[in-house]
Amino acid sequence: MKKTGILLMQLGTPDSPSVRDVRRYLSQFLNDKRVIDLPWLLRKLLVNGIIVPFRAPKSAKVYKELWEVNNGISPLIMHTENLQKKLQKRFINENITVHIAMRYQNPSMYNVLHKMSLENYDEIILLPLFPQYASASSGSAIELAMDIIRKWWVIPNISIINQFWDNKGYISSIVSQAKKFNLKDYDHFIFSYHGLPERHVDKVYNGNDLCQDQPCETELNEKNKFCYKATCYATTSLIVSELGLKEDQYTVSFQSRLNNRWLKPFSDFVVEDQAKSGAKNILVFSPAFVADCLETIIEIGDEYQEIFEENGGEKIQLVPSSNDHDRFVDGLEEILREKI
């Protein structure tokens, strides 16, 4: 019987909310050339000399708050481990093993792939847990995995799933989470995706084409099928279609920016504008995050709530991420079985 190893890859999290561990995490994350795509020396000076020293102490406080509301553990790790356990049960008695690794920090890609190399798998399937492809997320995880595997003496068959934004189980899990709320109670709906520098999506296109020259907000085609912005809008279209939302009821936006040259509109600005326009209750979706984490629980749940209240709004509610929802597990099982 063929022996298959599946590797679920997540972004990662500090080992603890201490300043030291947060500094180590941020340094590894932001020094990734696919995350900050600047020349090597400039990136090192910017990250190690400016960003990390100033950001680590502040981020450590936020991570401490995050872990405290989640019983002292990282929600990203918890949800990913729960997902792995549920998915493994779908492959009982099939000689298929599901592993998890973090692109940054632990469990590290190096350690997990080393253990997988000792299993003598006939086939390894790499699945980054990022529904919409981006070079800074899926691309980085895939590149590191392949850099490690290429040094093995025996390289098994390798399959890669680089995005799954249109998977029915994934979409269904978000819709199911949303239906736990009474949608009639909300004045507006925001679909908040993690932001990216505009130049990152521009690099998807060949020649002189730019993302702004494409119909990314309304159409997915052969040119923009790997454009992060285009697949975010396409994901939203699938969700709102299932929920029966009209175009004027929702806004697609992007969060967690580092500067103003990132994808727009910015989620915090949308929240502020909605409050100033008279909205009192908003429901926020975060489809790019399959596991609840700092960006959903703290940034949306706490920071955006504060912005909303300061500008006249009352309550922001967050739709939980897919996490280990059974429909999400169904969806991952489906796309994995297509590769096995």
Image (spheres, rainbow, N blue to C red):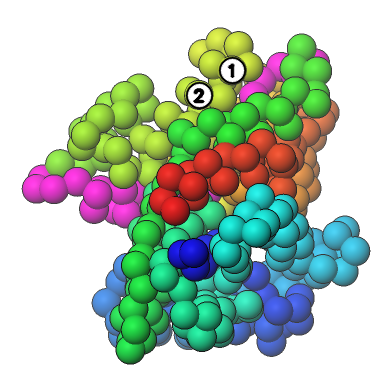
**Is residue 130 shown above or below 272?**
below
Of the residues shown, which amino acid type is indicated by label 1?
A: Glu
Is 186 in the magenta? yes
Q: Between marks 1 and 2, how big is the CA–CA gap? A: 6 Å
Write the start and end of the magenta stretch as one range.
185-208
| SS class, disc 2 | helix
Q: Are marks 1 and 2 in contact (CB under 8 Å)?
A: yes
| SS class, disc 1 | helix
Determine which of the numbered discs, if any, sits on residue 238 in the image: 2
Q: Is residue 218 visible?
A: yes
Which quadrant would residue 276 be assigned to in this image?
top right
- Write the residue at 48% across / 57% down: 127
Please tell me which residue lies in front, 32 or 331: 331
Q: Residue at label 1?
A: 242
In this view, which residue lies farthest toward the left? 207
Q: Is residue 42 visible?
A: no
Q: In screen coordinates, is 86 left or right of 157?
A: right
